[in-house]
Image (spheres, grey):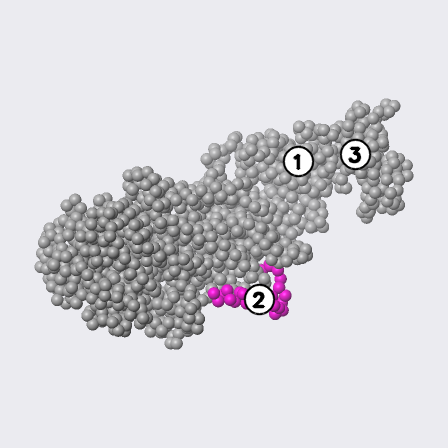
């Protein structure tokens, strides 16, 4: 690995946030053949990425008869918002016919504390690993990285037993802990890399200035870690909002998250699959993480730059 | 070893001449003492049984190439690295196991290490707030430091809005406000361009003369070392090669490494042996001979192989003297550096800018042997 | 602290240690403890509930003689290799394209990244639909006149993994692109100038100069991608449920179904153990070397 | 007591002694398709009428997804009030571990021993002489559902048995129909195999294979015939690109496919779609061959709870589910047969009546759920789905089947 100390110390403290401007080979400004090629490729690839979203959107605006006519790519002849209404407030699972609306608030209630706790713990871990290494810390970190590769299914049973033993099975706290545990490996890695890229001298200066473990964390590190926190928040909101397995195993019907309801709607078929409702439900469920992406995309790249580039 | 020998030869600063200006307490007795320091990571020993005593008010420079352990030593003194063995005393107190903040030190870093999210004022106040000082006291100290360093107009700016030189002033200010006895500088000028560097160098010197604090200054730049230091500790491989005042270091380097590291243009080394003719000792190499009359040190017996180290400015070029041939002429503005072949070896000499010697010309050399050094080729020590 | 001697080992860095307790607990109790627990019970004949009735290696013998497990391993290998290669290549190419000082960079980046915000369940569902031969892509293209056009990966045992890779890439490459883009932006501008002065073609600069310099990014990316590959489950369930037949079965699904559906915990744990051990053997030494090693990074 | 309970339900009165303690009871199940949801609503309605409250814990997907969640929750110490399981051997260990409560007292009071028909249903709920579950319906697997319209389109008469169905297939294909709709999930294919085994091979062969687990028979000539027929089924199902069973049923309902081999729960889908047995679709029990049905089905288990009010409510729920009125209402919607011999199903349609007749004749066998473990079932499902997806020969498949039966438990 390139010597990160050198890399870090040569960076002025204020440059640590990472850059967001392009730095590749400069193209000529004209409409050269190269530019045509460049944009051509980008547009074609963009179409491939947009296709499923387009299909989802178009389908969700069609009525069932039109869907049966086929042509999933055809724009709707008659736009109807009924599937959206149905997905949000009418679709049934078993006896509950209140669509996704109930799950939405459950998801919010699960996501917010889980995101907060997992990020708080992972950032402190990363900080301790990067700046306050103690004997054995690396061994624990290696095990933690191993944890990143453990399929959730494998750990389902031991965690059931664990939660039962500490009496938190079936509670919201239990679910928050589970999300914190499984978010920890990758988040800790990101935070550790980020804090390691903060010039070491800054940390030393703060120690000379009399700041301790928590003082440096809260007063020096936290205020300059916005980008990596944005990354962590995006990753965690996405992961936890989209989680199905833990949500269904560790909660009760009253507190099922939205994804469980999505699964129920999509998989409860009444004779014919109501593709339009399914697609509307799918989009609605994805709306929260999608919004966060659209809003903070630029910060995301900057944060990733700071958390992943320096190893 | 060498370090230990040299300790006794340390120069005592003229304490009585100090004028005390600025920080109260600057005149308090203070000294740093490193005793048998050892630092090892597993099998890798970085510093081995290193001892160093620094008198109060002394400006000491730790000089050496990168990787010589000078910054490591500074970090140990600061308490930023946990040492494996030995003790560190500051102002008569064993601080080996104390936190950096409790050691009575201030530190300035190469990359300035200013807290980017705080204003200059915030940066200066951070340590004081941590120490729980009253608000008024903090304000007083900041005002005074800002005045000394002339950074008053910058107090409300963020570091990102400062130039490199300004940032380093603030960094120095941060050490200053702590009102401590010992200042530690870790290559503070390395990130600045040449002009700013010489400006700030003078400023640091002035600061030292003003405050008379003990200062330990790490650098790889010999000009900084020679201009600033009361004493220089030249380091290599985790060992202090020589600890002495700049003049001694320059004129009587303890060994080949110090001799070669200090001085620009560098010292020339000639291989040869000692000869004796008529009671006088000569240095002989490739048929040429140099009389060793007036050598400051012990001339070894005849027949012994030695290395003669001589600085370019101590070689005079003229029509008369030991014969040599001009190879290359490097004009340097105020004077010229001539590269010559002497006794089959290459040698450099400083000549006036208008010396008038051309390439291939035969010339005669004169040596100021009182400023030259003889080294043992095996031990590399000065004889 | 006393100035007379070194403080006790335990109390060195005490705040850091206290702050690391959650991490240590997670590492030791959950990941290490859970693994040990799983390994121990893989030697038992536990059915619906875990019980310590040891049967030696019987579960493993059965595991390795089960065609479905073998298929699962092969499928994971196919998916893993394909998605590693393609996500790195595509991710890097997209990043390189975006790094050409183009207009609308934000728009393009958002488009490439948005699928990552969706869950695998959603991805699986949409692609299952697009690839459905009766009204998806094949249907449309046939309708355009190519009557013999056949693209029906999800119902063809030989092609099904490719269909899953297609959907997986759609969802995952955006993040890879982001990581690569960040890496490219971390390269010193002077490197580009130097390469241009020396007349090295752009592609060569990327291949021989830039990519080797991006090693840390590649490491992080590799961790994220590989972790995703081993966990592959939701996407398969949503797209094919392992079908047709067992053609798209994967190990995580085998584990899950033997534990809960077949009610043969022992068998599920044996399969888990094989997964965990292969991961542990590769990851732990590597992670220790990569992230442990020398001084603070 | 029974009379009074009945009265309570009819009047909706809450003034009865056991109704005094009202409790919320969470009931988990995987009945989420149209017909299923309508049926389970009957349970909920009846239970709510007792003053208690049915908290619906439907989990869509398949029984497998739901079961893993149920087992986790019960073993995790957060049990629901009651949960669906297929009766048979799925919950054996939970009972043995003491996580389920017995229903001996209610069974005694209600005299279930004499009203449940066939009695074997109750037996499979017993462990060590205690009753741990209540069967709620009888599901039989052995049905061939045919689309009258598909056959009319193809210009051939609606077949009366499997042979005729196979013979009519070419005509269907010519008319652009898929002869046999099959969802791409292992259990559906296993169902086809078991139906062919019982239909073409008969009762003795079925029992030899699954009850006695005779590997020699399983590898023998009689079973070879069944595999030949399965090979036919595989050929006929080409082009059936759906996953779940009700999507396959939808193909039959719309006339896109000729037929589907599926349990009687498919009936519910026809009903929801407003189709009439006999005119729109035809059902052939036992595939029109041997007139036997297996009595699998769903049952409810009641986890042991600490809260006495909830325990009381569990008993009320058990009682309500098995009351004649609920049984009728539920099974009419679900398309399955009631577990009581003493109820009147005049409202039943053609197909259900056929089933009832077979039930009366006593031509009932235990389902594979009761005969083999879930482990073996899973392996069987894997084998069948591999067989359907790949070009495995019937001989190879049979060889593996025999091996499977040999190691079955």
Residue drawn 57% across the image and 66% down it: A37
Residue tagged 1: B236
Q: Position of residue D203 (x, y in %)?
A: 18, 54
Q: Which residue is mark 2?
A: A37
| C-beta proximity under 8 Å, tags 1 and 2 | no
Residue at x 20%, y 47% (from the top left corner): D212
Q: Which residues are magenta?
A: A22-48
Disc sitting over residue B270 in the figure: 3
Indicate the secondary structure of the residue bearing disc 3: strand
Is A26 one of the magenta-colored residues? yes
Give the residue drawn at x 54%, y 49%: C216
Residue drawn at 35 percent across, 69 percent down: A276
- Do tag 2 and tag 3 residues touch (Cβ < 8 Å)? no
Residue B329 coordinates in the image, percent (x, y): 83, 45
Question: Looking at the picture, does residue A242 appear above or below residue B338?
Answer: below
Q: Chain of mark 2?
A: A
Image check: A36 left or right of A77? right
Q: Chain of mark 1?
A: B
Marks 1 and 2 belong to one chain: no
Residue B235 falls in which quadrant of the image?
Answer: top right
Q: Which mark is residue D260?
A: none
Packing grade of label 1 (10 A; few <14, some 14-19, many >=20) is some
Dot in front, 1 or 3: 3
Q: Is residue D352 magenta?
A: no
User: If the image is split into quadrants, where does the C terminus of chain C sit?
Assistant: top right
Residue situated in front as seen by the camera: B292 or C163: C163
Question: What residue occupies the far front of the structure in this picture?
Answer: D221
Counting the numbered discs, the total is 3
Q: Position of residue B25 (x, y in %)?
A: 62, 39
| Separation of residues labelled 2 and 3 (CA atoms) | 65 Å
């Amino acid at each position: 690995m390139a010597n990160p100390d050198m890399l870090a110390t040569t960076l002025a403290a204020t440059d640590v946030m990472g850059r967001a401007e392009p730095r590749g080979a400069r193209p000529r400004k004209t409409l050269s053949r190269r530019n045509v090629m460049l944009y051509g490729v980008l547009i074609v690839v963009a179409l491939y990425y947009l296709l499923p979203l387009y299909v989802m959107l178009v389908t969700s605006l069609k009525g069932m008869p039109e869907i049966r006519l086929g042509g999933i790519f055809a724009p709707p002849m008659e736009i109807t918002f009924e599937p959206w209404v149905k997905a949000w407030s009418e679709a049934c699972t078993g006896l509950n016919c209140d669509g996704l609306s109930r799950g939405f608030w459950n998801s919010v209630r699960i996501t917010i504390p889980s995101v907060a706790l997992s990020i708080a713990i992972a950032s402190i871990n990363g900080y301790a690993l990067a700046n306050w290494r103690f004997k054995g810390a690396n061994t624990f970190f290696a095990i933690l990285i191993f944890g990143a590769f453990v399929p959730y299914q494998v750990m389902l049973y031991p965690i059931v037993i664990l939660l039962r033993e500490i009496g938190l099975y079936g509670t919201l706290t239990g679910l928050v802990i589970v999300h914190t545990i499984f978010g920890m490996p990758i988040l800790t890695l990101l935070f550790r890399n980020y804090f390691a890229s903060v010039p070491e001298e800054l940390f030393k200066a703060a120690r000379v200035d009399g700041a301790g473990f928590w003082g440096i964390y809260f007063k020096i590190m936290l205020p300059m870690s916005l980008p990596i926190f944005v990354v962590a928040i995006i990753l965690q909101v996405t992961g936890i909002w989209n989680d199905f397995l833990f949500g269904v195993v560790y909660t009760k019907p009253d507190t099922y998250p939205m994804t469980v309801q999505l699964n129920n709607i999509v998989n409860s078929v009444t004779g014919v699959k109501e593709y339009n409702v399914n697609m509307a439900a799918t989009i609605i469920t994805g709306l929260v993480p999608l919004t966060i992406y659209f809003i903070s995309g630029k910060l995301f790249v900057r944060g990733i730059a700071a958390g992943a580039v320096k190893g | 070893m060498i370090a230990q020998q040299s300790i006794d030869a340390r120069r005592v600063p003229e304490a009585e001449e100090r004028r005390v200006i600025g920080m109260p307490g600057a005149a308090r007795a203070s000294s740093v003492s490193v005793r048998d320091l050892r630092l090892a990571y597993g099998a890798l020993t970085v510093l081995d049984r290193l001892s160093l005593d620094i008198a109060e008010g002394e400006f000491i420079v730790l000089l050496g190439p990168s990787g010589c352990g000078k910054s490591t030593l500074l970090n140990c003194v600061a308490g930023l690295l946990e040492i494996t063995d030995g003790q560190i005393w500051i102002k008569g107190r064993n601080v080996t196991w104390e936190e950096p903040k409790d050691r009575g030190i201030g530190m300035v870093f190469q990359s300035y290490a200013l807290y980017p999210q705080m204003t200059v004022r915030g940066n200066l106040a951070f340590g004081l707030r941590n120490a729980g000082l009253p608000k008024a006291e903090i304000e007083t100290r900041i005002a005074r430091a800002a005045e000394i360093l002339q950074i008053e107009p910058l107090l409300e700016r963020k570091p990102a809005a400062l130039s490199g030189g300004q940032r380093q002033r603030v960094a120095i200010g941060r050490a200053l406000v702590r009102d401590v006895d010992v200042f530690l500088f870790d290559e503070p000028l390395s990130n600045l361009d040449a002009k700013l560097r010489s400006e700030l160098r003078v400023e640091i010197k002035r600061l030292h003369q003003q405050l008379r604090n003990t200062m330990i200054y790490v650098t790889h730049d010999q000009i900084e070392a020679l201009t600033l230091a009361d004493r220089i500790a030249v380091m290599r491989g985790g060992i202090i090669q020589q600890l002495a005042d700049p003049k001694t270091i320059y004129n009587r380097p303890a060994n080949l490494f110090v001799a070669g590291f200090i001085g620009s243009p560098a010292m020339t080394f000639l291989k040869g042996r000692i000869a004796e003719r008529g009671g006088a000792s000569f240095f002989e190499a490739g048929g040429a001979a140099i009389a060793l009359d007036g050598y400051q040190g012990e001339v070894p017996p005849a027949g012994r192989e030695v290395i003669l180290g001589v600085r370019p400015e101590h070689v005079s070029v003229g029509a008369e003297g030991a014969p040599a041939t001009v190879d290359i002429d490097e004009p340097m503005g105020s004077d010229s550096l001539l590269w010559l072949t002497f006794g089959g070896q290459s040698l450099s000499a400083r000549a006036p800018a208008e010396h008038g010697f051309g390439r291939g010309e035969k010339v005669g050399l004169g040596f100021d042997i009182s400023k030259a050094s003889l080294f043992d080729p095996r031990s590399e020590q000065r004889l | 602290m006393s100035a007379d001697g070194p403080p006790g080992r335990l109390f060195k860095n005490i705040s850091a240690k206290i702050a690391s307790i959650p991490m240590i607990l997670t590492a030791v109790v959950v990941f290490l403890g859970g693994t040990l627990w799983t390994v121990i019970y893989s030697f038992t004949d536990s059915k619906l509930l875990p019980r310590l009735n040891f049967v030696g290696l019987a579960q493993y013998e059965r595991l390795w003689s089960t065609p479905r497990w073998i298929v699962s391993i092969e499928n994971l290998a196919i998916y893993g290799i394909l998605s590693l290669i393609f996500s790195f290549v595509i991710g890097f190419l997209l990043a390189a394209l975006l790094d050409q000082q183009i207009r609308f960079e934000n728009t393009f980046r958002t488009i490439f990244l948005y699928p990552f915000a969706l869950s695998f369940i959603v991805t699986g569902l949409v692609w299952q639909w697009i690839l459905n031969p009766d009204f998806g892509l094949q249907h449309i293209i046939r309708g355009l006149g190519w009557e013999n056009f056949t693209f029906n990966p999800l119902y063809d045992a030989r092609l099904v993994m490719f269909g899953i890779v297609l959907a997986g890439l759609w969802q995952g490459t955006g993040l890879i692109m982001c990581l690569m883009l960040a890496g490219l932006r971390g390269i010193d501008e002077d490197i580009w100038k130097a390469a241009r002065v020396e007349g090295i073609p752009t592609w060569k600069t990327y291949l021989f100069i830039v990519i080797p310099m991006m090693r840390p990014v590649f490491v992080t990316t590799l961790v994220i991608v590989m972790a995703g590959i081993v966990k592959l489950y939701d996407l398969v369930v949503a797209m094919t449920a392992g079908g047709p037949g067992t053609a798209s079965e994967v190990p995580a699904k085998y584990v899950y179904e033997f534990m809960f559906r077949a009610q043969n915990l022992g068998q599920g744990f044996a399969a888990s153990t094989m997964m965990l051990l292969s991961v542990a053997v590769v990851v732990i030494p590597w992670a220790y070397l990569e992230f442990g090693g020398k001084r603070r990074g | 007591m029974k009379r009074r309970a009945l009265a309570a339900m009819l009047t909706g009165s809450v003034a009865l002694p056991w109704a005094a303690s009202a409790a919320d009871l969470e009931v988990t199940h995987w009945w989420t398709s149209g017909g299923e949801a309508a049926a389970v609503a009957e349970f909920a309605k009846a239970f709510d009428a007792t003053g208690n409250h049915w908290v619906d814990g439907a989990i869509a997907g398949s029984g497998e997804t739901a079961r893993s969640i149920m087992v986790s929750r019960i073993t995790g110490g957060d049990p629901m009030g009651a949960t669906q399981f297929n009766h048979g051997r799925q919950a054996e260990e939970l009972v043995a571990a003491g996580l389920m409560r017995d229903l001996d007292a209610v069974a005694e009071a209600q005299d279930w021993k004499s009203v449940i028909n066939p009695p074997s249903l109750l037996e499979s709920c017993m462990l060590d002489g205690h009753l741990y579950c209540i069967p709620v319906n009888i599901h039989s697997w052995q049905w061939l559902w045919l689309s009258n319209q598909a056959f009319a389109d193809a210009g051939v008469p609606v077949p009366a048995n499997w042979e005729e169905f196979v013979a009519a297939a070419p005509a269907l294909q010519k008319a652009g129909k898929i002869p046999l709709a099959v969802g791409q999930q292992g259990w559906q294919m296993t169902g086809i195999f078991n139906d062919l085994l019982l239909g073409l091979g008969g009762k003795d062969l079925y029992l030899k294979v699954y009850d006695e687990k005779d590997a020699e028979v399983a590898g023998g000539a009689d079973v070879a015939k069944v595999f030949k027929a399965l090979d036919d089924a595989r050929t006929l199902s080409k082009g059936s690109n759906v996953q779940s069973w009700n999507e396959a049923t939808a193909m039959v309902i719309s006339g896109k496919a000729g037929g589907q081999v599926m349990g009687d729960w498919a009936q519910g889908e026809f009903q929801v779609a407003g189709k009439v047995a006999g005119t729109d679709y035809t059902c052939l029990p036992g595939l029109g061959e041997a007139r036997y049905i297996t009595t699998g089905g769903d049952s409810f288990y009641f986890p042991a709870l600490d809260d006495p009010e909830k325990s009381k409510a569990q008993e009320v729920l058990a009682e309500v589910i098995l009351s004649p009125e609920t049984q009728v209402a539920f099974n009419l919607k679900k398309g399955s047969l009631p577990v009581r011999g003493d109820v009147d199903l005049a409202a039943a349609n053609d197909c259900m009546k056929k089933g009832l007749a077979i039930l009366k004749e006593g031509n009932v066998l235990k389902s594979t759920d009761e005969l083999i473990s879930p482990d073996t079932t899973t392996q069987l499902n894997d084998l069948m789905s591999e067989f359907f997806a790949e070009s495995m020969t019937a001989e190879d498949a049979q060889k593996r089947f025999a091996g499977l039966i040999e190691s079955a438990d």
